Each structure stands twice: as C-alpha cells, then as structure tokens.
Image (cartoon, rainbow, N blue to C red):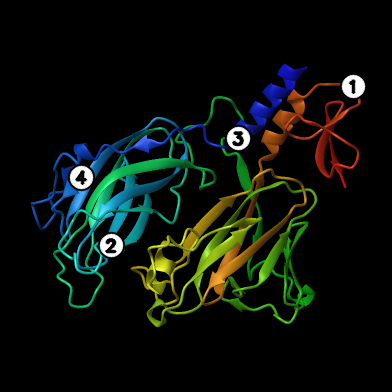
Amino acid sequence: MKKIFTLCAALFVAVMGFAQAQPINVDLSQMQLDPSSPHQTGHWNGEQLDYFQTGDIANIPLTNPTESAYKLSFSYATILTDFEVTIEIYGEDGVTKYTEEIALPVTTPTGTENDWSYWKDITATNATPVLPAGNYTISIKYGEGLWDGAPNNFGANIKNMVLTPEAGGTPSTPDTPSDSGSEVTADKLVGTISNTTVNAEACDGASWTFVNGEDLYFVSNSNGSKNFSTAGDYVKFSRKLDFTIETPENVIATAVEFIGYTNASWGDGSYSYISKFNGEVIDAHNDDKTSDFIKNRQAKYGFPGSDEKNDDDTQKVATHKIAIANPTAGAKIPFYIGGTNQICAIINVYAADATGIESIVSSIKVLDGAIYNLSGQKVGNDYKGIVIKNGKKYLMK
C-alpha cells in the first residue's frame, strides 16, 4: 500500500511539472568574442571574463541536459559607474529563447573607484521559458555606464555564472508530437484577469468579477473605497493594498502570472514590485542596493516604468509566473504591491492539465472507501478540494 502511495505522489510531482533538473555551471572559459565587438580586448583570464567594454559581445556555448525553466545568476565587478548588460539565450536554430537587460550597480566603495577586487552577486529578475534539452548559446552584450558623464568604455568583469532550475516558466512547444499521446505541458491557462474579461456591472469597491467562459474569478482588496480602473487591457492594482484572487471551486491553480508595468515613470524615481504572494514575503532588493532605480530594476518581481519602451515604441512590460505550493481547488490567492506606485497588470491563472489529473486518478485504484487527495494521502471528510474515492474523482466543498 505504501509503495502505491509513493508512486502516486511521484506521478503527481511529474504531472505538475516540478523540474528534476540540476543547476548548470556555465563554463565561461569557453567564451568566444563575437566578431562584431568594437573592442577586441575581451577574454577569459583564467578566473573571469575580463576587459570587455561597451558594445562587446561574449558568446558562451551551453548544453542543457534536462528540460526546465531556469534563473540566471552570476558575480560581477565594475568600477566608477553603474553598468548594464543584456543576456540572451538562443538555440541552434538561432531563435532567441530568453532576453533580459540587467543593471549592475557599481561595486567599488567610495575612495576605491579603481579597485576591481570588489564583487557582488546578482540574479536575473525573470526566469527563462522552459528550455528543452539541447544545445544553446548564452550571449552577454555589454551596454554603457549609467551615470551621466561616465566613460562609456568601462565594462564589467563577470564570473560564477549559474542557471538554477525554476518552477513555472512558459512551457516550450515540441518540434514533433509526443509518442506518449499525452499532453506535454503540466499546466494550462484557465483564467485571465484583465479589462477584456471584466464584468464591469459586477464590480464594486470591494470586489471585482472576471468572466472566463463558465468560470468566475473574483479579486477583492483590503480597501473597499478603491474602485475598479483600467489602462487599456490592463487592470490597475494600487500599492499597499492586500488583494486576493478567488478561483472557481473546479480549478486547481498551480501558478499565477503577472504581466505589467509601473504606472509611473522611472525618471521620476518611481518603482513597484510584488512584495507578498500567497503568504510569502518577498524582499525588493539586496541590502546593498539603495537607489530607487536599482530597487525597481532588480526587484525579484519588479516592473518597468511607464517611460520604458520597446524598439517599436510599445510599452515594455515584465512577466512573472509564480508557482503555487500545495495547489488546492478553489484556492484564494493573496498578493500585495510594494513600492511607490500602483501597477498596471494582466493576471493569468494556470491550473493542472486535465489529462494529468486523470492520470493520477487512474493510478489510484484503492477500492476501500477511503478518501485520498491528489498526492495519494488519506484525508478526512472535512477535506476541501478534489479527492479520489474508490478510483473516482470528486469535489468536496
């Protein structure tokens, strides 16, 4: 009996998409200087990427042994000025899979401006999409110093680059159909909270209603006087308010995705980020990052300012897909916006793929009249959510 439940739990973990991948230490010593680099001084000196300057590009081969999403982190040193780099990951087909611009606050304390021995660790704000196993290239594009009047030819030294497996991410689309005949993705989009799904007549100061097919999603806030408002397709969520997403009772939410931007200009010193999610308190920034600019740029779940534009002059947005621990049916999911200003966001709710749930149900064939949750654990009659009894699925309210 114990083996059956252990197997069921393992199947549940696999279906829900938690990565079994291991961290990847990027071998920077394999770096190749891109021919388009304006300076031909960048190289690997045995310890770090060294002598790279504005406009230079370092290309590093990467082998990903296991399909997973990842968070990128590395150590860096820069002198005189804050700096910035753009990280890209692209496949053998040349298609870019991930890109992020990362600000690097100056590492040298006052009075030691020419000392390259001061290092800081940094982690990218966004996870990569789910990357299938295969060969890739990491491209590091060196930008400019971020202080007015700073020499633009100063770069940043980089070492200890690691890709850490990350739950969530956007599932990749396979080139060929799966031989198993089952769905490849472990979760699917089931609900959207935006100006396109809102039922405006059912919104008041305390609760907003969003219609997705036959399902209703509700968003409540801790200040009933805050009325519903939008910016295009985006919903405005005020800072320093407790919001709660109430999902339908037939939905087991596995992740929530925020797509949006700060409803104010970075140039005015404004920033915003998700500071609490589903009971977890999230720090805005590391203790050694003090400026508002750096808080916004490097917050774990931060958003760009309204003055940040893409190359086609459209609004730049951040996308944060946050996994939910211990998913249950009809969950109420709280979140909180920190910073100086509200965010304009579209929120997507993801749930367990139906084929995955049916696989778990079919694997639990205990016909003893007992009640089990989707992890194969025996539960009581007061349990709420989707359960399995005598091999069949039920919703207990």
The type of residue carrying mark 1 is Asp
Residue under numbered circle 4: 48
| Mark 2 to mark 3 CA distance (whole Å) | 40 Å
Q: Where is residue 367 in the image (x, y as percent from the top left)?
A: 87, 21
Q: Position of residue 106 (x, y in %)?
A: 27, 64
Q: Where is residue 325 in the image (x, y as percent from the top left)?
A: 65, 45
The type of residue carrying mark 2 is Glu
| Mark 4 or 3: the one toward you | 4
Q: Which residue is drawn at 75% across and 52% down?
A: 331
Residue under numbered circle 1: 368
Kind of element beneath mark 4 = loop
Lateral position of residue 4 relative to residue 389, left or right:
left
| Mark 2 or 3: the one toward you | 2
| Mark 3 to mark 1 CA distance (whole Å) | 30 Å
Kind of element beneath mark 1 = loop
Give the position of the N terminus as an image quadrant. Answer: top right
| Mark 1 or 4: the one toward you | 4
Counting residues from the start of the chain, the first of labels 1 and 4 encountered is 4
Lateral position of residue 162 relative to residue 150, left or right:
right
In the displayed structure, 32 sits above or below 106; it is above
The type of residue carrying mark 3 is Glu
Q: Which residue is drawn at 38% across and 80% down?
A: 267
| Mark 4 to mark 3 CA distance (whole Å) | 42 Å
| Mark 1 to mark 2 CA distance (whole Å) | 61 Å
User: For residue 183, which numbered disc appears in the image?
Assistant: 3
Q: Position of residue 228 (x, y in %)?
A: 68, 77
